[in-house]
Image (cartoon, coloured by chain):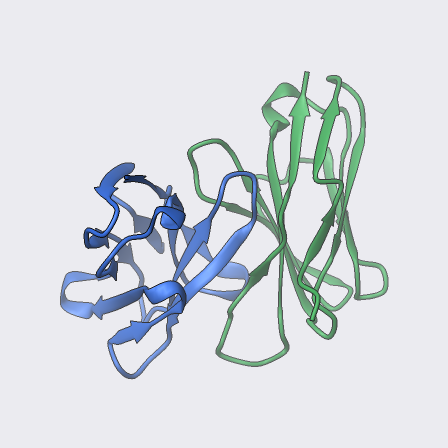
Chain colours: A blue, B green
Amino acid sequence: AQSVTQPDIHITVSEGASLELRCNYSYGATPYLFWYVQSPGQGLQLLLKYFSGDTLVQGIKGFEAEFKRSQSSFNLRKPSVHWSDAAEYFCAVGGGNDMRFGAGTRLTVKP
Amino acid sequence: DTGVSQDPRHKITKRGQNVTFRCDPISEHNRLYWYRQTLGQGPEFLTYFQNEAQLEKSRLLSDRFSAERPKGSFSTLEIQRTEQGDSAMYLCASSPPRALEHEQFFGPGTRLTVL
């Protein structure tokens, strides 16, 4: 069965610092992978997705993620965090009616 | 270009009451999904429509839950005899009729509080 693990429940970074959010997945075939962001009380907004091809994918708001099949990982990165990036981040695997989400990582940004 | 909309945004009800939520997907999106999200967790799949047909239901969807999409456009999710454990954010998502992409566009959610 497919599943997603986000090992970090909560991360705090200083504004301007780099960010990496971890995501590990379990999936029987080539996965579709997604990162979503959720601000308090809001729905989920897609940051980026990986279906095939180049393993480094660029997303919105300056985010990127790298698919590493050998490590079953799809970590999200940003070189310089802005205060507005404070939110909950969810990694997801699958798609359609078989989308599985991780439990999320809450990002706090210090001034 | 309007996104997925959900109504109401917040609902407070007493245990035992029935509640109904509405989701309007992006126009021309033929696939519609309902999820439940509890505090500190990611969304969990509840059910899925392709056009007006309900193709899959999660075991999370007890007999008290029912969802419809009568004309293949908007959808409703009804919870009968609500329980305190039903308190959660209910999210709706839609996706276009293109193969392989599977990207889902989410609405803002309906937060349900059962007292």
Q: Which quadrant holds the N terminus of chain A?
A: bottom left
Is A23 placed above or below B50 here?
Answer: above
Q: Residue at x 63, y 45 (%)?
A: B109
Nearer the observer, B112 or B86:
B112
Tally the numbered discs.
0
Residue A95, percent across and down?
A: 47, 65
Residue B2, percent across and down?
A: 70, 66
Q: Which quadrant holds the C terminus of chain A?
A: top left
Residue B31, percent across and down?
A: 66, 67
Please identify the residue farthest to the front as the structure is shown: A111
Nearer the observer, B22 or A86:
A86
Can you see residue A8? no
Q: Quadrant of residue A72?
A: bottom left
Is A61 placed above or below A23 here?
Answer: below
Q: Residue at x 28, y 56 (%)?
A: A25
Q: Residue at x 34, y 52 (%)?
A: A3
Is A98 placed above or below B112 here?
Answer: below
